[in-house]
Image (tube, grey):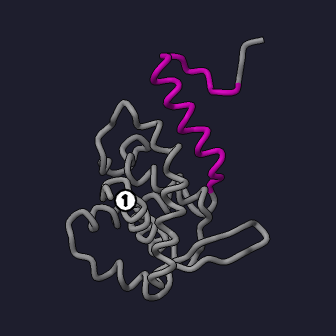
Amino acid sequence: MNPLNSPVELGMRALVLLAQASPEALDIASLVVLDHAVLHSEEFDGPPSLLPELPAQPGELGRKRQLLHEGLAVLMRAGLASIDATTDGLVYRATDRGSSFVGILEAPYVGQLRERATWAVEQFAPHADPRESMHGFTTQWHERFTGTAQPLGEHDA
């Protein structure tokens, strides 16, 4: 098992996001957007990014949802996160045990992750529309690759 970009790594980042958002719950779409914002925060006028800009970066989002599902399952089996069914769908939250677990982690990377998670939650959750945020990300990549500023989904008549 590759520890990088694995369900365990994404689950740990999700746990930090859920702990920062607590007591609010987040759905999987919001977690995908927030995780992307945490890793590439500098692109959104936030603190320095945790990861360098890579050519394959847009492909991250395609795999992230499934890996997050698997990571959240690991967190729930460990009692670090819980899932609730609401009228808006399934939402996840950090348990008291999960928030305490994040609090005892001392690695410098976790400190940077907490700092960016706090920033991302304040900037994008809970009022941001994950679909709109995702559209913004893909439009930004489209502009970067094509050199045009035309938003995706809008065509000249």
Q: Quick one: which residue is furthest to the front in this view?
A: 1
Magenta residue span: 128-153
Residue drawn at x 35%, y 67% as measured from the top left: 114
Seen from this angle, which residue lies furthest top?
157
What main secondary structure does the magenta stretch of the protein show? helix
Q: Position of residue 111 (x, y in %)?
A: 27, 67
Q: Residue at x 51, y 69 (%)?
A: 72
How far across and how far down the image is residue 9, in percent? 36, 62
- Residue position marked by numbered label 1 in the rendering: 116
Considering depth in this image, is 99 or 78 the residue closer to the camera? 78
The image quarter containing residue 23 is bottom right
Which residue is pictured at 68% across the width and 69% down the height?
90
Task: From the viewer's perspective, tell me whether residue 144 is left or right of residue 104.
Answer: right
Q: Residue furthest bottom?
A: 96
Of residue 16 and residue 150, the one placed in the foreground of this image is 16
* Front residue of this view, candidates 14 and 62: 62
> Is residue 98 depicted above or below 46 in this figure?
below
Displayed quadrant of residue 82: bottom right
Left/right placement of residue 2 relative to residue 140 reads left
Tell me if residue 14 is in the magenta stretch. no
Queried whether the magenta region covers residue 137, the answer comes back as yes
Image quadrant where one finds the C terminus: top right
Q: Quadrant of the N terminus?
A: bottom left
Give the answer, above or below, for where 60 lies relative to 16: above
Count the numbered circles shown: 1
Residue shown at the point (65%, 52%) measured from the top left = 129
Residue type at mark 1 is Arg
**Dot 1 crowding, Cα within 10 Å, few <14, some 14–19, many 20+:** many
**Vertical placement of residue 133 versus 76, above or below:** above
Query: Disc 1 on helix, strand or loop?
Result: helix
